[in-house]
Image (cartoon, helix red, strand yellow):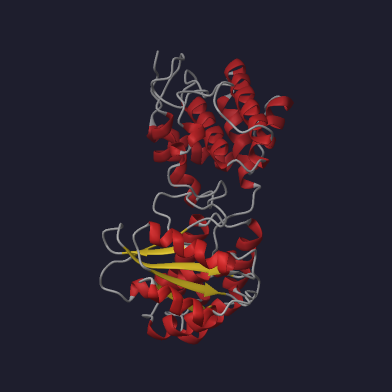
Amino acid sequence: MNVNVDSGRASQILKDATLAVQDRAYRVPRDMETKIEQIIGHTHLTYKYILLTGMLAKATNPEANPLVLQAGAPLEGAFDARSLCHGVVVPFEQTVLEKRLGGSNEPFLNKPARYTHLSLENAVRRGKDRLTLERLIGVFELVNENSNGDQALVCVLSYILAMESRVVTFDATRAEKFVSKARLLNLVGNLLSKSCEGETLALSVALLFELMAKGAAAGLEVLSHPANQSGASSKEIADVDVFEADGKTPRHCAEAKDKPFTRADVDHAAGKVAEAGHSGLIFIYGPNAKTSEDMFALVKEYETKGFDLTFVQADTFADGIVALAPSVSAAEVVELLNKHIVMTRAKEVTIKHCKEVIEKM
């Protein structure tokens, strides 16, 4: 039999449970808390969202079964977990919890949440991911047995709030009305002072394209993508893609490389662009990039194939974009940076560096 989990009530319960964390006002069996700690500590983001959503459902309606992922699950206590997650958990996680789980907009669209319910029969990679699924099922079975969803929810939130915030913030009281072009260039330079495995270059390029888009009247869409996860998005072409207002037609495709590269790296990046039906690539290389290739010769070779290849140093690219950029506030810069921190799934070390740079802005 299906049950209802009221979104309005769930939102209030989530707020109250977050406040209760301050007093560590919860009591759960030690084995339950251990499993919760291990799930939150693991790198699998979707399972963390499922954990918080399931516990919230149980705290809101004790008849709800947290093992459920879809309303059509063949289990007693089935409910619409996707709606609860995307409608209540996601906005709360992005604001109050400062994206500590990853800042995903629609986590229940990921493969682990596409089943009707959690089961050991669900496909999952062996090793730690498999173990996390087993722990998740185990902790939900425990909360069903103990009927302590309210206490378990506070426990889950206590471990989430102990994580580092994935949001870059700044002191608005000392922020000026706009960030000068000199300060924007200094910001990019400071970001690139640490490579963070190339992530700071990708973030800088995305930020610069966002500034370009702000100065364009066409309503361009700037997307960046996780490093070393080619094809992770159906709209992904290069490291940073700029689309026309229709969100489909590419205007600029940029590869961001901050390590030594070869002809094969260039061919691979250009090949992805050509496959997407676009005929131009901006290959932006950072301070740690080196190559023995004759870039001028490569450009001429690609030109004979009808492909427009451009090589440009990151600082030169920044100079050109910032010179033509419209006036922006510190709040806008931070908002854009946070947008692409989420899109690129930046590592903790990268986020820490970004926070330090913004603090000095």
Q: Residue at x 45, y 76 (%)?
A: 301
Task: Name above or below for residue 7 compared with residue 338.
Answer: above
Q: Residue at x 50, y 46 (%)?
A: 93
Task: Name above or below for residue 118 compared with residue 172.
Answer: above
Residue 280 located left or right of residue 267: left
Q: Quadrant of residue 315?
A: bottom right
Screen quadrant of the N terminus: top left
Q: Quadrant of residue 349?
A: bottom right
Q: Residue 156 appears at what percent x and percent y?
A: 61, 36
> Is residue 170 visible to the viewer in this orientation of the structure?
no
Task: Name above or below for residue 86 compared with residue 138.
Answer: below
Q: Residue at x 57, y 42 (%)?
A: 45
Total numbered labels: 0
Q: Quadrant of residue 158?
A: top right
Camera-nearest residue between 256 and 13: 256
Q: Residue 20 appears at what percent x and percent y?
A: 59, 39
Q: Residue 160 appears at what percent x and percent y?
A: 61, 43
Q: Residue 83 appears at what percent x and percent y?
A: 39, 34
Residue 332 located left or right of residue 191: left
> Is residue 327 visible to the viewer in this orientation of the structure?
yes
Residue 277 located left or right of residue 115: left
Screen quadrant of the C terminus: bottom right
